[in-house]
Image (cartoon, rainbow, N blue to C red):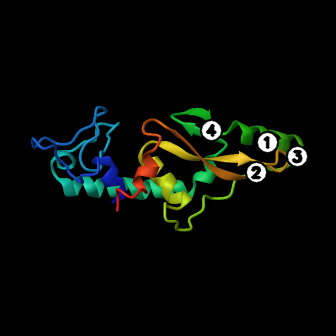
Amino acid sequence: MRIACVESIYTYNQFWDDGTPRTSPTGAVGVMQLTYPDGGKTCAHVWDWKANVNQGMQVLRYTRGVASRFHLSEGNVKADGITAVWNQDLVNCNGVRKANNLPNFTPTPLDATPQVNGSQQERQAARNYNKGREYDWKVDDTTTCAGHWASDPKLFSDRDYVNKVFGPNCP
C-alpha cells in the first residue's frame, strides 16, 4: 500500500475534503490515482475507494510482472509500433558482438532480493506504476557487454517518486 500512500499525497483518501473525488491535473483518480488512457474509467473507480484500490493493485501486479522481465527490454523495445532505443551503449555493444558473429547480450534480471528500501524489481515495479524507468544497464566491458544495473530514473513525472514510495513516510 506504499503506492497508495504516495499517490494519495500521504492521506490514503479517495476524496478531497469537500467530498469530491481526488483527481490530478492529468485526470488520475482516487487513492491509487488511476489513469484511463483508453477511456475505461468507471463510476466505481471514481466513487468507491475499494474498487479504486482493487484496480490499483491489479495494475501493480502487472507492473511487477513487467519488472521481472525488465532486463529483456533493455536494448530495443517497441512502443506503439515505434522502435525506441532505451540503452544506446548496449545497442552499440551488441552491434560489435554481431560483427564478431556473437549472440546478443541480455543483461541479468533485476535483483529480487528484499532490501529495506525495496529490491530492484520492487523499485522498478513502483516506477512502472508511475510511468517510467528506474534502472539502466551500465556497460562496463564493451567487448562482452558485461555491466551492472544503475538507478537512473527516466520518467514522465516525479523523479523522486520511488524514494517516496520506499521512504519513512509510507509505512
**Residue 86 bears which disc, if any?**
4
What's under tag 1, amino acid-wise? Cys
**Earlier-in-chain disc, 1 versus 2:** 1
Where's the C terminus, which quadrant? bottom left
Residue 41 percent across, percent down from the top left: 25, 42
Q: Secondary structure at mark 4?
A: loop
> Mark 3 Cα within 10 Å, few/some/many (few <14, many 20+)?
few
Separation of residues labelled 4 and 3 (CA atoms): 23 Å
**Earlier-in-chain disc, 3 versus 1:** 1
Residue at x-position 60% and y-position 40%: 77
What's under tag 3, amino acid-wise? Asn
Residue at x-position 60% and y-position 62%: 111
Q: Are marks 1 and 2 in contact (CB under 8 Å)?
A: yes
Separation of residues labelled 4 and 1 (CA atoms): 13 Å
Q: Which residue is mark 2?
A: 105
**In this view, which residue lies farthest toward the right?**
100
Q: 140 or 68: which is nearer to us? A: 140
What's under tag 2, amino acid-wise? Phe
Camera-side mark, 3 or 1: 1
Left or right of 24: which side holds 106?
A: right
Q: Secondary structure at mark 2?
A: loop
Residue 109 percent across, percent down from the top left: 63, 59
Q: Secondary structure at mark 1?
A: helix
**Residue 101 bears which disc, if any?**
3
**Residue 93 bears which disc, if any?**
1
Q: Eyeballing the image, is 112 above or below 62?
A: below
Residue at x-position 63% and y-position 51%: 72
**Earlier-in-chain disc, 4 versus 3:** 4
